[in-house]
Image (cartoon, coloured by chain):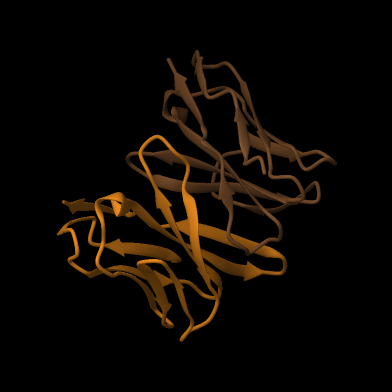
Chain colours: A brown, B orange
């Protein structure tokens, strides 16, 4: 079966712009979570959605937001981009919260 | 403060040389502990979930164990294809329906042929 699909794979944006990343979970999975991965900080949890509701949230500023649609697809938005937002953004899906997650290959965001 | 610490940061082993990776955690309440494997340029690949102290899970050459303060990932007779970064993550209960997911920085494992 198809895995977790993230689009786009690579993105270059200018400081101050905003960006929207997309994630299509494995069919039937209702939990979608987002992570930021950088060499210095490692993997950091952004937020998790389950059945269109945000259930958990990490320690990131309000510039980072997300949503989940009725078909479980999810989007993450970052407004007023900063250079420090350059990272690999990973999406993961799971059948239920608290179970093992299947990750996508990520979107590599570069802010210049 | 909730935190997850993995050790060692990096480990080089000869093929067939067994060893263990450590993940120690400090959280107020544990909902689950996860182990992942990550290859360069890819997203993490799920390996195991452990929920309570004393629990053990096995998959091929890997065995994960859990105590109240730490988890170990034992690698028996590793092969070069086991080379990867191994990540530990903890789902900590904050209260109500809120949880916090905390990842360790990972252990970079290199198996020499």
Q: Is residue A75 visible?
A: yes
Q: Give the vertical position of A85 relative to B14 (above or below).
A: above
Q: Give the vertical position of A28 relative to A86 (above or below).
A: below
- Which residue is most to the bottom? B54
Give the residue at x 31% y 54%.
B82
Q: Disc count in the image? A: 0
Relative to B65, is A57 on the left or the right? right
Q: Quadrant of residue B30?
A: bottom right
- Which residue is most to the right? A70
Q: Is residue B105 visible?
A: no
Relative to B94, is A71 on the left or the right? right
* Residue A108 spot, x, y in % from top left: 47, 27
Q: Give the vertical position of B49 relative to A42 (above or below).
A: below
Q: Nearer the viewer, residue A41 or B15?
A: B15
Q: Nearer the viewer, residue B91 or B1?
A: B91
Quadrant housing the C terminus of chain A: top left
Relative to B74, is B92 on the left or the right? right
* Residue A48 spot, x, y in % from top left: 66, 50
* Residue A105 spot, x, y in % from top left: 51, 36
Give the residue at x 67% y 44%.
A1
Give the residue at x 47% y 42%.
B43
Q: Give the vertical position of A82 relative to B83 (above or below).
A: above
* Residue A23 spot, x, y in % from top left: 66, 35
């Amino acid at each position: 079966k198809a895995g977790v699909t993230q689009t786009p794979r690579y993105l270059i944006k200018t400081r101050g712009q905003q960006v929207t990343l997309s994630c299509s979970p494995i069919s039937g999975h209702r939990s979608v979570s987002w992570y930021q991965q950088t060499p210095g900080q490692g993997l950091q949890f952004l937020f998790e959605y389950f059945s269109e509701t945000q259930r958990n949230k990490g320690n990131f500023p309000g510039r980072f937001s997300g949503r989940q649609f009725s078909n479980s697809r999810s989007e993450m938005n970052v407004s007023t981009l900063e250079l420090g937002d350059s990272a690999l953004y990973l999406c993961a899906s799971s059948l239920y919260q608290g179970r093992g997650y299947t990750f996508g290959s990520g979107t590599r965001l570069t802010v210049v | 403060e909730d935190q997850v610490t993995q050790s060692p940061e990096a480990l080089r082993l000869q093929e067939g040389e067994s060893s263990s990776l450590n993940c120690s955690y400090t959280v107020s309440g544990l909902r689950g502990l996860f182990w992942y494997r990550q290859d360069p340029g890819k997203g993490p690949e799920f390996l195991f979930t452990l929920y309570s102290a004393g629990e053990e899970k096995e998959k091929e050459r890997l065995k994960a164990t859990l105590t109240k303060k730490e988890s170990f990932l034992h690698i028996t007779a590793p092969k070069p294809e086991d080379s990867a970064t191994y990540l530990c993550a903890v789902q900590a209960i904050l209260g109500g329906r809120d949880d916090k997911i905390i990842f360790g920085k990972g252990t970079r494992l290199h198996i020499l042929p």
